Amino acid sequence: MSNAEFYSLIKPGMKQELGSHTFTQEEIVEFASEFDPQPFHLSQEAAAKSNFGALCASGWHTLSVWMRLNILNGRKELIRLTGYEGPEPMFGPSPGVRDIKWTRPVFVGETIHYSSTVAAKRDSPRRPGWAIVMSHSTGFTQEGAQVVSMRGAVTIQIDD
């Protein structure tokens, strides 16, 4: 099989289960201290006085975890879903994300499960021999409440 054959096996609606992550107080504060130092991400006391009412993870933290799980598991999961049995397909960079929505805060101790669903695919208009796979990604709490969603894309080489 080839990259083109792998690409032909990708179908809209394929859902990649990326994995889960439990957010601890220590990592929420550590991430916020370095990248998003807003008071409600840094201390329980400050968060209690905010509109969130309790310490919560930065939205950028929730997306950073999605990115990690996507890199570690997303490609393997897409290969598994397609049934592809050839050499490792050549994935390229993402042309970007859009429509990021943080629909609910992530509080200390919550476990978020992430997934991405193929929305569409097309040949790249700017890079001959490459295609773009668009997806819709989400994160949900263990109780089923959505906390984040976004639309993104990845490039795949289709000419061997």
Image (cartoon, grey):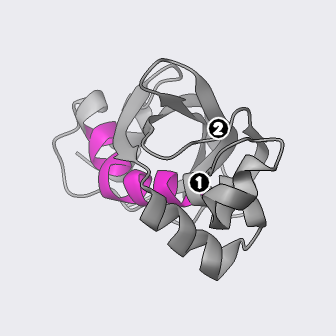
Q: Which residue is mark 2?
A: 148
From the viewer's perspective, is residue 42 above or below residue 158? below
Left or right of 90, for residue 85: left
Q: Are marks 2 and 1 in contact (CB under 8 Å)?
A: yes
Q: Which mark is residue 63?
A: 1
Q: Is residue 158 visible?
A: no
The C terminus is located in which quarter? bottom left
Distance of label 2 from label 1 (alpha carbons): 8 Å
The N terminus is located in which quarter? top left
Could you tell me which residue is drawn at 58 percent across and 42 percent down?
A: 106
From the viewer's perspective, is residue 160 above or below residue 84? below
Q: Alpha-carbon neighbours of circle 2 within 10 Å: few (<14), some, or many (≥20)? A: many
From the viewer's perspective, is residue 67 above or below residue 118? below
Q: Which mark is residue 116?
A: none
130 or 33: nearer the viewer: 33
Per the picture, the main secondary structure of the magenta-coloured stretch is: helix
Measured as percent of width and height from the top left, residue 42 is found at: 65, 67
Helix, strand or loop for disc 1: helix
Q: Alpha-carbon neighbours of circle 1 within 10 Å: few (<14), some, or many (≥20)? A: some
Helix, strand or loop for disc 2: strand
114 or 79: nearer the viewer: 114
In the image, residue 71 lies in the stretch drawn in magenta: yes
Residue that lies at the very extreme toward the left in this rendered image: 85
Could you tell me which residue is drawn at 71 percent across and 71 percent down?
A: 36
Measured as percent of width and height from the top left, residue 15 is found at: 43, 26
Q: Which residues are magenta?
A: 63-79
Measured as percent of width and height from the top left, residue 99 is found at: 80, 41
Could you tell me which residue is drawn at 20 percent across and 56 percent down?
A: 87
Q: Disc 1 marks which amino acid?
A: Leu
Left or right of 45, for residue 7: left
